[in-house]
Amino acid sequence: MEPKFSRSIQKNIQLVENILHLDVNDDVVVRRFRALGQECVLYYVEGMSSGEQMAEHVLRPLMNSSLTVSGRDAVPEAMKDIVEATETKLEAKPDSAILELLRGQCLLLIDTCDQSMVIDLRGYARRSVGVPQTENVVVGPHEAFNETLRDNLTMLHRRLPTPKFICKIQEIGTETSVQLAVCYLDGVCKADTIDKIEKRLEGAALDYIMTAGLLEQLIEDDPYAPLPQVVGTERPDRVVSFLMEGQAVILLDGSPRALALPVGLWHLFHAPDDSYMRWQYGSFMRILRMLGALVSLLLPAVFVSLVIYHPMTIPMTLLTSIMQSRTIVPMNLFSESILMVLIFNLINESGTRIPGLMGSSLGLVSTLILGTAAVDAGLISPFLIIIVALAGVGSFAIPDYSLSFALRIGQIVMLLAAGLMGVTGLCYTFILLLCWVAGMQSLGAPYLAPNSPRRSHNPDLLLRTPTFRQRLRAYLSAPEAMDRARGRMRRFGRGGAK
């Protein structure tokens, strides 16, 4: 049976000590004192609560009060008339009260009362609002989420001062629970979207959810799909744009990354810079990103398939130069390409893991030294180095980190198909990949929508259009939100206000 508080403070103290293992746990501070004519005890975790605020708003008012109360009204009377803390609540369940205690709040017990008071005086050290590390922009805000859920929600409330902004805070984790927040705009986000998210969170049965990346893997539609089905971001302004488009956002305590869903393929090519600059510049950057994705995915495979199986399609001057550069190379082109792609990914990964400026320096020095030495030794063809380098640069142009990883894996798959079966195998593999992507879903929404299947949507999708034409809601919005947007378009027109 679930334990309960009793009206005897000695039994309550014994119950709390047993749950917290205070005979061996020295991290919880116990402060016993007399107030209101009764014996009282205050629990808090050292370093997680503010001692100065505790003394000012709890201990001094209670100990200096001349009020005398007893029975079940002791804690409610103290919370109502004496304790000066801004956030307090009654808690009758010991497990819930101790869970709040371990999250940094204080727990007050008073004799003759079978309820406890939970006081929010959290004062633990936390990282301040910083600069985005993976989503830097030239024009726009330079704020990023941190690891504290309340700070992240505060940044969203500051940008969305509307009562339609809904935030549902709940617990996840079977053994050790973690707080998360499901955020959305009422009347803009579909009710079906929120229902699906809550069902998947209930089914995410894991002892402990450490990061948002782990949560993403538990709630995605298809864990074997080649592309990410959730967009992750560390920028509050980008989260606001997702909310305005009718998507829901999940924030996890302890993780500086927010998850937005459902998403489509085109969301992965969007960056904050697109909206902060003129529409011509944003469209140009998106075209460059899509071109970089195609170069990263297909360029090494196309080069290998043409040189090995279809050399007559290459201009004679270029083919002669390629063959002359390969006369002293001991490996065949297919094996050489696989080796070069793997070495490039190895250098990139090692440069990422080494901290500070040393990482970028290592990547540059390794590329120059290994590339020059390999060409001088006749182990690698100069043309292949150029091809692999261009493919790597194309992957770096992708704004979404997960999508860039997916393209690198797809690059190796395409290269294997091209080396084993030529252009025919490359085309078949690419078509199968397109069919797989076309059948993907994100929280039940088609992955290639609104282009396939065709749906009404905001024109800011594949390319940007002038801002005054972007009055229509995104295709993920609720039907009533789309109707309101169409009404505004009829009222003001597509070319500006009447």
Image: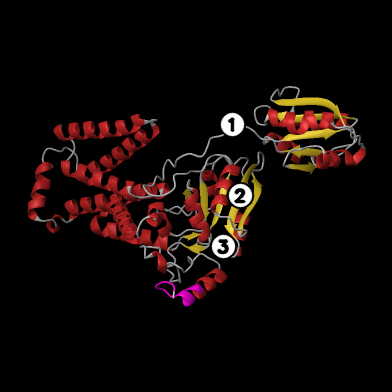
Nearer the observer, disc 1 or disc 3?
1
Secondary element at tag 3:
loop
- Left or right, 415 with respect to 276, comes to left
Nearer the observer, disc 1 or disc 2?
1
Q: Is there CB contact under 8 Å for labels 3 and 2?
A: no
Q: Amino acid at mark 3?
A: Cys
Tell me which segment is drawn in magenta. 488-497
Residue beneath the point at 64% across and 33% down: 123
Spot occupied by residue 114 in the image (x, y as percentages of width and height): 87, 39
- In-front residue for pair 406/423: 406
Q: What's the distance in space between the residues labelled 1 and 2, CA to CA?
A: 21 Å
Q: Quadrant of residue 30?
A: top right
Quarter in which the N terminus is drawn = top right
Q: Tag 3 or tag 1, which sits nearer the N-term?
A: 1
Sort mark 3 into few (<14), some (14-19) or many (20+) by Cα contacts within 10 Å. many
Residue beneath the point at 11% across and 51% down: 319
Spot occupied by residue 403 in the image (x, y as percentages of width and height): 40, 50
Quickly name the residue at label 1.
125
Q: Quadrant of residue 336?
A: top left
Q: Tag 2 or tag 1, which sits nearer the N-term?
A: 1
Quickly name the residue at label 3.
189
Q: Amino acid at mark 1?
A: Ala
Quickly name the residue at label 2.
181
Q: Is residue 38 placed above or below 388 in the rendered structure?
A: above
Secondary element at tag 1:
loop
Q: Is residue 168 placed above or below 431 in the rendered structure?
A: above
